[in-house]
Amino acid sequence: MSTGDVDLALVLAICGIAALYVPKRQVDPDRGREWLAAAEHRVTKHLDQPSIFRIQALLLVIYHSLESRSFSKAFMLIALAARSAFALRLNYEHPQLPFEQQEIRRRIMWSIWAMEKTWSGGVLEFKLCHDSTMHIRLPCPEDCLENGTAVEMDFFDPDATVTALGTPLNALAQCIRLLTLRNACLRWAIPNLLSYYPI
């Protein structure tokens, strides 16, 4: 992949995030915020043309919104990221793609799923990524992706505690399962709490 293949929105978002974590004498944090705003503008300007790069840029913008405590903005932008991901069918496997590309697509989708799972808090009206729509395998271990070692993970099963081979789930898969359990608990607890403490 050449540098020219990468969408400018992603370049701006990466530079913007990096600028917030380097010493001020090297890069002015305000410059970083300007780059992030420019990245967001480029993504929203091309809503009818979603791409992997633009979704990645949007996720970085969402991360910055959370870091700067702009929770309402992040809450709305994650819906845009989810809709874009579904438009590109990132919630489905694409076996014809190379391992790294397939894994990147999975991780983008699982990142959106995890954010949505955290924020929806068991409230049905806020759900964007239902478990039944996740027709992709669990993310592979970090070292496999870094080394380019192709491995075939299990498909998502919210009740699974081990893999199909009986081996323990890796850390990323465990996090996904914990978020599923958390959401199930909240989905049960919220209606019961409201019955005792009506709004």
Image (spheres, helix red, strand yellow):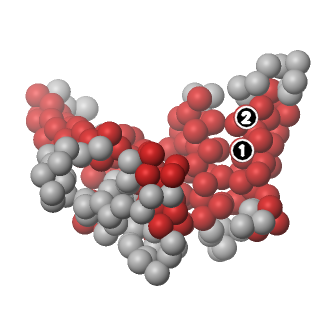
Tell me if mark 1 has few (under 14), some (14-19) or many (20+) residues whose alpha carbon lies within 10 angstroms of its own.
Answer: some
Q: Which residue is mark 2?
A: 18
> In the rendered structure, are the residues bearing label 2 and label 1 in contact, judged by CB atoms less than 8 Å apart?
yes
User: Percent position (x, y) of residue 111?
Assistant: 45, 50
Looking at the image, which is closer to me, 187 or 162? Answer: 162
Element assignment for label 2: helix
Q: Quadrant of the C terminus?
A: top left
Left or right side of 81 for 112: left
Element assignment for label 1: helix
User: Percent position (x, y) of residue 154?
Assistant: 25, 61
The three-letter amino acid code for the residue at tag 1 is Ile
User: Percent position (x, y) of residue 162?
Assistant: 15, 49
Looking at the image, which is closer to me, 28 or 128? Answer: 28
Q: Is residue 23 above or below residue 168?
A: above
Residue sitting at x 65%, y 60%: 54
Residue sitting at x 58%, y 49%: 59
Q: Is residue 85 above or below residue 63?
A: below
Residue sitting at x 39%, y 41%: 119
Q: Which residue is mark 1?
A: 14
Res. 182 visible in picture: yes
Looking at the image, which is closer to me, 84 or 96? Answer: 96
Res. 130 visible in picture: no
User: Percent position (x, y) of residue 4?
Assistant: 82, 66
